[in-house]
Amino acid sequence: MPSSPRHGLVAALLAAAGCGAPAPSLDDPAPPDAALPAAPIVRAVTPSPGAAPVARFAVEAPAGTRVLVYATADCTGAPHADLPAEQLAMTGFELDVAPGVTARVAARRQDADGTWSLCSRPARYVRDEGGFQRLTFGDEFKGPQPGDDPACFTMPAQCVGEYQTGVHACPGDLPGLAALDKCKWTVLHQTNWMAPGPTPTTNGVNAFVPGEVEVAPTRDDGVLVLSAHGHAPDGTELSPGTNTSSWAALFAQPMATWLAGYDCRWATNTTSCPFRSGAVYAKRQPTAGAPASALTRGFTQAYGRWEVRARLPSGPGSFPAHWLLPQQGAWPEAGEIDLMEAGRDAGLVYQTFHTGYCDRGADPYEPSPEACRAGGGQRLKLSKGALVRARAAATLTDAYHVYAVDWSPERLRWMVDDVVTLEVPAGELAYSTFTDHGLRWRGAARPVSIPEREFFLILNQTVHEDGGPLNPYGFVPQHQVIDYVRVFATCTAPDQFCPEGSAFDGDDGRCYPLTGDAAPTPSPCARRPTLGGLTDIDPDTYSTCTDPCPFGGWFSGTTCEIMTVPQGDSWFYTTGDGVKRMYWTDPTATCTAALDGPSATLVQVGDHDGANCHLDPTLPGVTYGASGAGFHYTPVCTHH
């Protein structure tokens, strides 16, 4: 009695009951291969890997023979179908396959004289729902390796002054760039926009220069080192052991005095700055002198897993970062994804997403600032982030850690050492902090949009005014050591898993030839790493906080910053429990606020100084205090 070709409960019961002729015993001595009938040919008809829950297999055997089909690779166990070859030729064989499972189907046939064939070569079907990734970009910083294009290392290093000078050959003989893959990386050579001076018209404090970038192939099996050093106005490097007392008097003066001796202006992109540091990026660029459309260097990608393994520096002003920006598009509308940012002690890392929103515009996700304004909209910047602190002192500076983001159309997921620290799904509320420069909006909560454009990676070591002592005299050099960079894309089409003529096995990640005796070969696609979630973080390793500012505003590293509340205006926010509330100030009832709710009770929130309200730090639940032109409150997250 033949069983159904569809694998299911009925087929399993039939096989278990022994319906049909008994299956051949694999323990019986087998005669020489030449004396056995040829095995059936089994192949997967459903494209593999695929998302189909039911896979169809074709089974070919001579007419008039009986075929046993097994859901195993070696014809062991009970057969799942016992059918004439003619029926299999018409209907094939179907098998239910669970997500993430590799199904293997093999078959034997029996000739009219009762002789059984050997087991066939197994056919494979992998039910995949985005669970495999392939490496699309990477650098181990080992110098030229087999298979690399030698020209990528022998060509001149290329620098860029993003805002003024454009692409140009890096100046001078820089041995640290000899092992840099110039096809992948461009070196930043410009004043750092993230480290301005005390006022917009003064010199800044930091520049990115190529001399602070080094690829060291023999150190830790290959690393990229982004350094930072202090310099005197005449260019003399100032570091412990080399400083002289002649500089002490200069730097004992106020910063505005000694800063005036430098030429460190963003507007002209000059780089004679008190602190010089290293940065590279993979933005797609033409070679200097080539047409601007010839983007032959760099790498961009939309979506996928982006990861950097690094050992972080520490010290006054230290601000290492690994982050993504779009190849094209306005900021913040087109988005920014920060894999890692860290402060001066590298005891706490930030992982953040920034994007834009066109409030009151026809299209809230209008990518053009000009179109948003022209349509009567107000540009908002939205931010959402996580904090991760290593509980063991100096863990992030003494050892390498992997900082990563997994980016899909549905969500962004950040990780440290494959522990998930934050997930931001599309549409989740985030808080706005400012719009166009010079304009302020009141912390309105709006839904985020996950970026769709291709992004590139930036690696930098910044030195900036971070609220503590910062002086080139006696500055201890900082060294961010990057072990590798890897970018992965989700494998989607079968031809990405294996070359034609072979089938992918998801259990061992290899490609098996469909015919012949060639050995299997590794597939470029591998399973995504197993991730620990927010609920199972090792308490002895990390402390995380995914929403330090639930009442709105932006986390500065120590406080939650909000804009000044002008008299007669309002500031909206949405709390973590989804309740929308509002602070407002009324000229007729100075510095009072109303909380949306059944009672809408007016509450005195602070003292009016003639222009703004200084919020009362004794308000229940949140501590407020004046912070320059705005206000801040203490984050809800605490770290041990």
Image (spheres, rainbow, N blue to C red):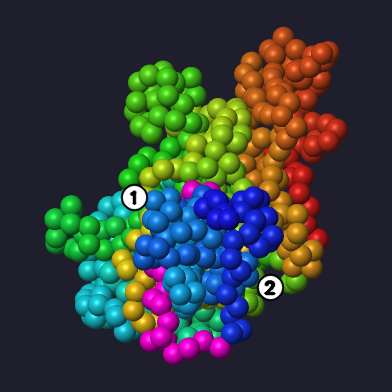
Indicate which disc residue 157 carries: none
**Of label 1 and label 2, which has the lower sequence position?**
1
Spot occupied by residue 230 in the image (x, y as percentages of width and height): 48, 71
Spot occupied by residue 427 in the image (x, y as percentages of width and height): 56, 34
Q: Could you tell whether 465 is left or right of 555 in the image?
A: left
Q: Could you tell whether 608 is left or right of 381 in the image?
A: right
Residue 584 in view here: yes
Q: Is residue 49 magenta?
A: yes
Spot occupied by residue 485 in the image (x, y as percentages of width and height): 46, 69
Q: What range is drawn magenta here? A: 29-53
Q: Which residue is mark 1?
A: 327
Spot occupied by residue 496 in the image (x, y as percentages of width and height): 37, 61
The crowding category of the residue bearing disc 2, from other C-alpha atoms within 10 Å (few below 14, some 14 to 19, many at least 20), is: some
Tell me the SS state at disc 2.
Answer: helix
Rounded to the nearest whole Å, what is the CA distance between mark 1 and mark 2?
34 Å
Q: Which residue is mark 2?
A: 395
The residue type indicated by label 2 comes to Thr
Image vertical order of residue 62 relative to residue 546, above or below: below
Please tell me which residue is depicted at 32% across the width and 68% down the height of the picture.
501
Magenta stretch, overall SS? loop
- State the residue in front, 48 or 374: 48
Tell me the SS state at disc 1.
Answer: loop
The residue type indicated by label 1 comes to Gln
Q: Is residue 180 magenta?
A: no
Give the quadrant of the C terminus.
bottom right
- State the residue in front, 237 or 488: 488
Give the quadrant of the N terminus.
bottom right
Please tell me which residue is depicted at 81% across the width and 21% down the height of the picture.
604
The mark closer to the camera, 1 or 2, is: 1
Tell whether label 2 touches label 1 (CB within 8 Å): no
- State the residue in front, 385 or 533: 533
